[in-house]
């Protein structure tokens, strides 16, 4: 049974979220406390999944994204009751609406002149159909957090990928995983935060139907 140490971190995140909600001037960037608490919750789960004795490394992040792309992670990684409950509590906090938005709302506000996504997958790549025919919560590409993420990202290919997501936010998680693996840069704090939010928490919400 996986050992999950999310509860303590989540309590801290709740208070941090309330503080930010009361202070519009507080930054909500990848390095901010509420974001790092969410990342820590994800990393604690990674440590349990991969039996890590230390904090996850670049190689561990790559392994996770690769396993996600190959759909080789056990479904229980996303459906464990504690993780579902954590996401349900997260959805009740003001910080949730600072980070996520309904996919339909994002498409509604999208630039009609946006070009199609340039990211392509090989024919052998089986893209996960998370959220198909549903109105999923996705990381909001127009949020203050995402703007800060793009601004702080140093690697040019990662920055281009994030800007592509801003232009075409309905890029599937499978294609995003493929693109991240192709770039192969997992050392930046911001991209780790994006992986935690977009390729973990959004998955937990989508797989468990937390989109109502």
Image (cartoon, helix red, strand yellow):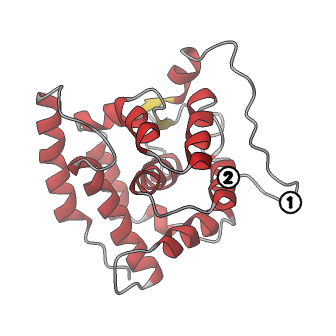
The image position of residue 96, as x and y in percent, is 31, 37
Question: Which residue bears the numbered disc 1?
Answer: 124
Residue at the farthest top position: 112
Label 2: which secondary element: helix
Label 1: which secondary element: loop
Label 1 vs 2, first from the N-terminus: 1
Number of numbered labels in the structure image = 2
Give neighbour class at mark 2: few <14, some 14-19, many 20+ (Cα, 10 Å): some
Indicate the quadrant where residue 24 lies. Answer: top left
Does the image show residue 186? yes
The image position of residue 123, as x and y in percent, is 88, 54
Look at 62% across and 48% down and name the residue there.
157
Dividing the image into 4 quarters, which one contains the C terminus? top left
Indicate the quadrant where residue 47 lies. Answer: bottom left
Indicate the quadrant where residue 28 lies. Answer: top left
Left or right of 41 in this view: 17: left
Look at 49% across and 31% down and name the residue there.
141
Question: Is label 1 or label 2 in front?
Answer: 2
Is residue 138 or residue 160 the one in the foreground? 160
Question: Which residue bears the numbered disc 2?
Answer: 179
The image position of residue 78, as x and y in percent, is 47, 62
Q: Which mark is residue 17?
A: none
Q: Is residue 115 above or below residue 200?
A: above
Asked if marks 1 and 2 touch (Cβ < 8 Å), the reply is: no
Dividing the image into 4 quarters, which one contains the N terminus? bottom left
Distance from Cα at disc 1 to Cα at disc 2: 15 Å
Left or right of 166 in this view: 196: left
């Amino acid at each position: 049974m996986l050992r999950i140490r999310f509860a303590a971190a989540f309590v801290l995140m709740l208070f941090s979220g309330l503080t930010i909600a009361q202070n519009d001037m507080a930054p909500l960037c990848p390095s901010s406390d509420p974001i790092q608490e969410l990342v820590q919750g994800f990393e604690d789960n990674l440590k349990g999944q991969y039996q890590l004795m230390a904090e996850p490394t670049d190689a561990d992040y790559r392994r996770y994204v690769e396993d996600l792309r190959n759909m080789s992670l056990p479904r229980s990684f996303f459906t464990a009751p504690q993780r579902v409950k954590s996401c349900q509590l997260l959805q009740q906090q003001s910080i949730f609406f600072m980070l996520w938005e309904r996919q339909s709302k994002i498409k509604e506000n999208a630039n009609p002149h946006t070009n199609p996504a340039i990211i392509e997958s090989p024919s052998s790549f089986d893209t996960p159909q998370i959220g198909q025919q549903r109105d999923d919560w996705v990381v909001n590409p127009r949020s203050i957090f995402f703007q800060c993420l793009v601004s702080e990202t140093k690697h040019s290919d990662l920055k281009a990928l994030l800007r592509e997501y801003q232009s075409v936010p309905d890029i599937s998680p499978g294609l995003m995983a493929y693109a991240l693996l192709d770039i192969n840069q997992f050392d930046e704090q911001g991209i780790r935060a994006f992986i935690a939010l977009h390729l973990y928490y959004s998955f937990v919400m989508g797989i468990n139907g937390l989109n109502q």
